[in-house]
Image (cartoon, rainbow, N blue to C red):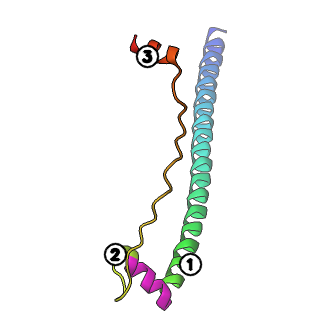
Amino acid sequence: MRAKQWRQGVLIGILLLVAFWLATSIWGLFAKAHVAVSEAQEAAWQYQALKERRAVLEANLAALNTPRGEDAAIRTSFGVARPGEEVIVVVPPAPATTTKPLSWWEKILSWF
């Protein structure tokens, strides 16, 4: 009788160890799947950003392949002008300042 109980105890212990091992394995797989899904989403976002950047760069390249685009790029990069061109400086208008004269009591209070 004692041997039968001892075998059942060992069997239960082994089954508990196997169940614990399976639970930790499943938990590890769940964590790995979560990381894989989040990295896949990040990769998709980066791919979309790269596609948008590629479209912008292709548009810039198409603009630079024209004579007008080359001229604009050279002018902005090196600050050059064609012969006969002059620099125009646009100055904003001075703000209109309208100050009313101080009354006699405001003049007295400003001394303190």
Is 11 magenta? The answer is no
Percent coordinates x, y for residue 25 in the rendering: 58, 37
Q: Residues within 10 Å of mark 3 (few under 14, many from 20)?
A: few
Percent coordinates x, y for residue 69 in the rendering: 48, 84
> Please, what is the three-letter code of the amino acid marked with disc 2?
Gly
Q: Is residue 47 above or below residue 60?
A: above
Q: Is residue 93 above or below residue 63?
A: above
Secondary structure under badge 3? Answer: helix
Find the distance from the CA under tag 3 to the CA under tag 1. 62 Å
Q: Residue at x 58, y 69 (%)?
A: 51
> Please, what is the three-letter code of the amino acid marked with disc 3?
Ser
Residue at numbered disc 1: 59
* Quarter of the image where the C terminus is located: top left
The quadrant in which residue 80 appears is: bottom left
Q: Earlier in the sequence, mark 3 or mark 1?
A: 1
Task: Report how many numbered discs are placed on residues in the image.
Answer: 3
Q: Earlier in the sequence, mark 2 or mark 1?
A: 1
The quadrant in which residue 56 appears is: bottom right
Residue at numbered disc 2: 79
Residue at numbered disc 3: 110
Span shown in magenta: 66-75
**Main secondary structure of the magenta stretch:** helix
